[in-house]
């Protein structure tokens, strides 16, 4: 069973004449097969640092990260990243952007385009295959980014605030689309967001982080995304008393964490 | 005066600047927004009229500033007869070869050099001091050295122009390397890209807009240096034509030569812009 293990990971930066700054301290959790883990927290709590560690763009100061018992030492195709923005290549059209990872891996054009078309279809981008990236709306661009990330058939999708730059309506639709893709592909997902509602709705497991030093303050198991697969009605779930109660609880936790660090 | 009390000249100017609806719902755009072509056209016509007026009226002697018609006549005469025994097209051809030869050489050497300097601290460490040392020196200042080192033939002329084109090309390519977003680079690495693949598939394409800008700046420097390059031991070329015409006080030919150089440079700039729109249509867009 594929699994990502984060074992007692810390990241600290030396500061001249002062004690070192801890961006992350003693982070320890696992992501299992078919988990959708969401990290939530105020700015500066180390969410993105954590994602960069899993992606292999950074190395931890202490502890280790392993995927399927192999220790992560650098970026690799078993972990694909969907960025918030600026990650697509404007000189390539949609089809070539989606096929970009396969090009790097040395597949021939025929094979690249076959695989890319499959994910273009999954993300509903068929009419835009030949479009230029800069002609697409922000929401469509994020779909291209997700399709591209899926082509290398990764074990885990790392999503760094993928919906952060979208307008509210597009964002809600994109949430449902990502859940559908997750359901269809069965990938593990590690998803970062600022939005409590988004975190609650999408995740199977929620990690609430707090800043200075960046650490996990609370962990919740969430039922809502599975309910969405049963009912298909996102607004109904988000308006339920249980959802709203949990949303307020988590907001209070985050505000308290943030106030606590401001006093220091 | 029109009915609503504004005068007609005001309306013409407002039309030229495209300040859309006059009052209700006035649009406040980005500074500098709007069409400027018509204003430029009017200014050019006015300048030529002014030039014609002061020369025909005799305020300025033809020796100092010939009339527009005089320049046109000089143009026709040089086209027919050539200048100093060399045909007009020959002058243009020789100068164009010198400038474009130097420009191509600067592209071939300057773009890879700039990219290397952007990518590697070692390359930057090696090439930054010499380039920053010679860059601000006017080419006229080291023209004597070029002649002592490389002789009085084509080589020294092309190298002088090359040296003035090289610096902007290197700086442009070097800055272009920084255009790739860290997310684009990370995306490539996370698919397992090698460093070379990242350079070839991400860094180079995203540097293209900056490189095109550098090419436009560079070729401009090339034409600027042309006259200096043709000062010594030249028997043909537009720069030579302008210089020797000025020695013989043939002011109409001087002005004609200047206009021809400007026209060629302007046409080439538009050619580069055309290619730019084809090759880097994403420039300046998300």
Image (cartoon, rainbow, N blue to C red):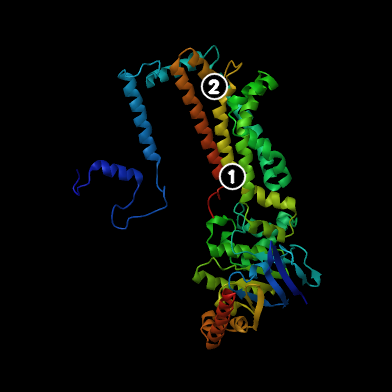
Determine which residue is flagged by label 2. B239
Please report, as a chain letter, where disc 1 is located.
B
Residue A128 position in % (x across, y down)? 57, 60
Determine which residue is flagged by label 1. B210
Q: Is residue A68 left or right of residue B281?
A: right
**Circles 2 and 1 on the same subunit:** yes
The answer to which of B42 and B234 lies nearer the viewer is B234
Question: Toward which corner of the image does residue B46 lie, by quadrant?
Answer: top left
Question: Toward which corner of the image does residue A23 lie, by quadrant?
Answer: bottom right
Residue B31 position in % (x across, y down)? 41, 50
Residue B217 position in % (x across, y down)? 56, 37
- Name the residue: 33% across, 51% down: B20
Q: Earlier in the sequence, mark 2 or mark 1?
A: 1
Q: Is residue A47 above or below residue B30?
A: below
Q: Is residue B150 above or below residue B125?
A: above
Instruction: Look at the image and tell me in which quarter the C terminus of chain A lies.
Output: bottom right
Question: Toward which corner of the image does residue B116 lie, by quadrant?
Answer: top right
- Name the residue: 38% across, 16% down: B62
Residue B203 position in % (x across, y down)? 66, 50
Q: Is residue B131 above or below residue B239?
A: below
**Kind of element beneath mark 1:** helix
- Looking at the image, do the residues carrying marks 2 and 1 touch, with CB atoms under 8 Å apart? no
- Name the residue: 71% across, 75% down: A27
Q: Residue furthest front?
A: A17
**Kind of element beneath mark 2:** helix
Q: Determine crowd level at label 2: few under 14, some 14-19, many 20+ residues with C-alpha closer than 10 A.
A: many
- Whether residue A183 is visible, yes or no, is no
């Amino acid at each position: 069973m594929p699994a990502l293990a984060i074992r007692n990971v810390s990241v600290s930066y030396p500061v001249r004449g002062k004690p070192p700054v801890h961006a992350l301290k003693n982070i320890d959790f696992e992501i299992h097969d078919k988990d959708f883990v969401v990290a939530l927290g105020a700015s500066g709590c180390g969410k993105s640092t954590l994602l960069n560690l899993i992606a292999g763009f950074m190395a931890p100061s202490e502890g280790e990260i392993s995927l399927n018992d192999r220790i992560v030492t650098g970026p690799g195709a078993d972990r694909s990243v969907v960025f918030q923005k600026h990650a697509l290549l404007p000189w390539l059209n949609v089809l070539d952007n989606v096929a970009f990872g396969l090009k790097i891996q040395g597949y021939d054009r025929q094979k690249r385009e076959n695989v890319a078309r499959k994910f273009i279809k999954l993300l509903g981008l068929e009419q835009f295959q030949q479009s230029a990236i800069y002609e697409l709306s922000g929401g469509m661009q994020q779909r291209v980014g997700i399709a591209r990330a899926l082509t290398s058939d990764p074990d885990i999708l790392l999503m760094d605030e993928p919906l952060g730059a979208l307008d509210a309506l597009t964002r809600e639709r994109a949430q449902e689309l990502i859940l559908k893709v997750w359901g269809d592909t069965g990938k593990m997902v590690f998803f970062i967001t600022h939005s409590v509602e988004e975190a609650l709705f999408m995740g199977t497991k929620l990690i609430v982080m707090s800043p200075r030093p960046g650490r996990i303050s609370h962990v919740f198991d969430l039922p809502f995304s599975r309910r969405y697969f049963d009912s298909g009605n996102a607004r109904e779930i988000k308006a339920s008393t249980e959802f709203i109660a949990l949303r307020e609880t988590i907001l209070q936790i985050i505000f308290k964490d943030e106030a606590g660090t401001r006093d220091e | 005066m029109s009915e609503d009390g504004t005068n007609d000249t005001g309306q013409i100017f407002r039309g030229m600047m495209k300040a859309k609806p006059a009052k209700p719902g006035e649009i406040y755009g980005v500074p500098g927004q709007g069409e400027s072509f018509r204003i430029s056209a009017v200014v050019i016509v006015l300048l030529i009229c002014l030039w014609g007026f002061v020369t025909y009226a005799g305020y300025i002697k033809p020796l100092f500033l010939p009339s527009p018609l005089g320049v046109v006549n000089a143009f026709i005469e040089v086209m027919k007869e050539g200048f100093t025994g060399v045909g007009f097209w020959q002058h243009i051809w020789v100068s164009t070869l010198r400038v474009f030869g130097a420009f191509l050489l600067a592209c071939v050497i300057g773009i890879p050099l700039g990219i290397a300097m952007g990518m590697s601290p070692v390359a930057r460490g090696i090439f930054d001091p010499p380039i920053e040392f010679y860059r601000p020196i006017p080419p006229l200042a080291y023209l004597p050295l070029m002649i002592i080192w490389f002789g009085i033939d084509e080589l020294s002329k092309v190298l002088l122009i090359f040296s003035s084109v090289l610096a902007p090309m290197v700086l442009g390519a070097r800055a272009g390397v920084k255009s790739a977003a860290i997310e684009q680079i990370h995306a490539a690495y996370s698919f397992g890209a090698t460093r070379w693949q990242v350079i070839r598939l991400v860094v180079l394409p995203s540097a293209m807009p900056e490189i095109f800008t550098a090419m436009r700046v560079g070729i401009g420097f090339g034409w600027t240096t042309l006259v200096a390059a043709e000062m010594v031991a030249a028997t043909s070329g537009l720069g030579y034509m302008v210089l020797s015409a000025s020695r013989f006080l043939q002011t109409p030919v001087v002005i004609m030569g200047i206009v021809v150089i400007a026209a060629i440079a302007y046409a080439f700039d538009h050619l580069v812009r055309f290619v730019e729109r084809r090759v880097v249509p994403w420039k300046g867009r998300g």
